[in-house]
Image: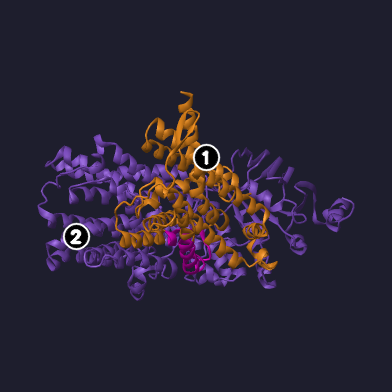
Chain colours: A orange, B purple
Amino acid sequence: MEALLFTQGLNVVFEALILAMLVLGLAVVMGLLNVLNIAHGEFIMIGAYAAYIVQRAGLPYLLAIPAAALVCGVIGLVVERCLIRPLHYEPFETLLATWGLGLLLRKCVELGFGRGYRSVDIPIGGSVSLFGESYPTYRLVLMLVAVLVLASLFVWYRRAPTGARIRAMVGNPVLAEAVGIRTRELARNTFITGTALAGVAGVMVAPLTPVEPFMGLTFIVNSFFALVVGGMGTVSGLFAGATIIGGLQSVLSAAVSPTSAYIAMLLISILFLWQRPRGLFPRP
Amino acid sequence: MAYFLVRSILILAFLILIPPLLGEFWAYQLGLYFIYGLAALGVGLTWGQAGILPLGQGMFVAIAAYLTAHGLLAFGSSPIAYLALPAASVIVAVLAFAFAALVFRGRFEQGPSFSLMTLALTLAAFQVANGWSSVTGGFNGLRNIPGLPGLDGFLDLYYLIAILLGLSIAAVDYLVHAPIGVLWRAIADNERRLAFLGYDVAVIKAVAFAVASGLAGLAGALYAPQQNLVTPDLAGFAFSGDLVIFAAVGGRATVLGPVIGAVVVGVLSAELRDRFPWWEIGIALFFIVVVLRLPGGLMTLFAPLQRFSFARTTIRARSAAPGKPRIATSLSVAFEDVRVRVGDVTILDGLSVRTGEEAVLCVIGPNGAGKTSTLNVMTGMLPRRGGRIVIDGADVLRPEPAIVANKGVARKFQTPSVFPKLTIDENLAVALWAGRWRGFDLLRLGLFGWTSPLLEEMRGRFQFLHDGTRPASALSHGERQILELTMALITEPRMLLLDEPCAGLSHEETAAVIDAIQWARGELNLRIIIIEHDMELVRRLADRVVVLHQGRFLADGSVEEVQCNPEVRAVYVGGSR
């Protein structure tokens, strides 16, 4: 019984960490730039397809990470230049534009790869015995990677001069420009970072889920509502949202059914959007 | 009115003439696109008019389709089955109204939040439709739904759909041009201003959402007998998204645009789906182009035809607006130990001040003294942490802009707050209707002719108000100040709050505004509270001056008394305090 609880606990942590990884790119774009990138899920999907191609080509799976980051970064660059910047980073207009973008990317991938499910093999097989219970190694590796990525990004954001510049730009774009911060380049790079992170997250989850053109929809919904609950633009918000939504999904899926877990998440999100639209830990 | 009838009849005749010209296959296809067009018509109404983007209208289509399907399965060939159509539509509209009124209550400019709530709702509805097999037939949906009794073949049903669509277009066309339509556009423009005029913004928005959802419901009710099949896909993310795309591609700001969008996208996809696998990419690209460059959608192409639209150009006979039930005494207000904090900043620190016998009270104080915040907390724009606010002898426990406005308080903001996209006449009309409309007045075109002696007086004083068809966005800063002042005055308030009413005005304009304020005060017997830095203006208007400092009451008295007060001098000159 205790071992089962332990596995369950580990699953909750796993869901929360993976969700935090999936949300990260969206959190960067939405929390810092106020751009509601509805196509975020499609960038995750493209990352997953990158992983599929790399694996099919017989190349080492690790290569998929730079490949996905590159592809999604380049698409992000084009999107920033052609969509987001002309719309002046307006939340509402960019929401619509990225809605169209999501449609476009889904259809392009569908045209290239077909609608069918592709599966990506788990690159690190086997399982590890923890307190008498076996747990898949790949999941443990993912958790480790997620912790490392999240922690280093957090430290970088707090310590590095670029982090300070981004915070200055978010706080007051006009003043930031006046003191010599190139807000245009900075915003572009932030956006690209967000899409590239989505691609990397796609590589991480690809072996755990069927890879298909519409897979992004589930991810965007979960990530989006995690941010809504947690609050935009703060690290605590990211973790709180990922823990609540990811944990809830994990527990309710195991205890009742995945469908009720999903519906419960949607209802909680509606409550938050209504009563606390800025989330638990909003940017001050 | 004549234009409106002609246009509606032309549209209806066109819809009815299609099948003899195009054949039965197209009657079936177009019937389906018209159903989508019905739902898109509603999206255009809420989004293009009231500025509320619904991302989950598919849910309402689905609910109505399931309801109708059960109605048809239960009653079969009995004529009672026809009742399922209006019943489903009305049930869905009532549901939508209840949800929207609840969510909109007490909140302003929710923007994307509401859109995302509707998205979450439809996602949840999809799951429920998939899982609740006993009612919805689960994943495979409800099959073999009988058609409507007495209608043979697709052609009969086509005529029913076409007639309902034509009537719906006419109804929406009418609403958009009726006073309620002006209020919807006013909401999209400047929600708070409307609340400060005393309108219940939440209800007006909820009505728009309910009408849109009723149309979605009608679409769903027709979908069931047309397709003989209802699946959870109707509640899916993709279908709701398609409705938004139809509205955007066709042109959300117009009545016909969304319907045209649905038909064009539908026909194109039917024609191109098999031949060009990439046609959907084309649609997605076009949608993006619309967002980027063509906010008017396809209807931009028809812009030259706009002249023929049923128009406000007809000069309406002027009629006197009904008088406002009004108590002829001025309103009193008292603050008792009011405290306001935002974050770590103390804004009002136990402010106690009350109006007395005077007619014009000027509030002065250095920047950050809490002058504007005093008005904000009184009108419910800032939450209060403690103390009491008493208006007209009654405690106001939860001040809200509309509640305070309906007590007879009108407010003019520091930066002029008007409806920039509406014309001068519409701006004035919205203010004039406030508190005067009763029952179904907001559906009567006659309201556009309303006028009042006060309005005519202001028109006489300020010539630019005669130029009624100019949009308010084309006005200069000074003209906007005067327009807003006029809007505040013609609500015939018992108390007028003016926040630096003459900022940015020329010397002549300032003189004219002071003159108008003096006149209105005598005419309406009103109390005026003015926040002002300009001591010249204070000297000319004030019966009494109150000085605030750091969120507290510092001194009061006549202009001379206050000017001689050593404490006041110290605050302004930066002495020992």
Asked if residue B461 lies left or right of residue B254, the reply is right
* Residue at image mark 2: B29
**Residue most toward the bottom?**
B304
Spot occupied by residue A112 in the image (x, y as percentages of width and height): 32, 62
Spot occupied by residue B176 in the image (x, y as percentages of width and height): 38, 60
Question: Do pointers 2 and 1 mark residues of a single chain?
Answer: no
Task: Tell me the amino acid under the disc marked 2.
Answer: Gln
Residue B276 position (above or below residue B95): below
Q: Chain of mark 1?
A: A
Q: Is residue B526 visible?
A: no
Q: Is residue A62 visible?
A: yes
Spot occupied by residue A236 in the image (x, y as percentages of width and height): 59, 44
Identify the mark at residue A208; answer none if there is no mark.
none
Asked if residue B472 lies left or right of residue B20, the reply is right
Which residue is depicted at the point 12% across and 41% down? B78
Give the total number of marks visible in the rendering: 2
* Residue at image mark 1: A243
Task: Tell me the amino acid under the disc marked 1.
Answer: Thr
Of the pair B523 and B57, the residue shown nearer to us: B57
Is residue A80 one of those drawn in magenta? yes
Q: Quadrant of the N terminus of chain B?
A: bottom left
- Dot 2 alpha-carbon crowd within 10 angstroms: few under 14, some 14 to 19, many 20 or more: some
Which residue is depicted at the point 14% across and 47% down? B147
Which range is magenta?
A70-98
Q: Which of labels 2 and 1 is toward the front?
A: 1
Among the 4 quarters of the image, the one containing residue B20? bottom left
**Residue most toward the top?**
A1
Asked if residue B205 lies left or right of residue B1, the reply is right
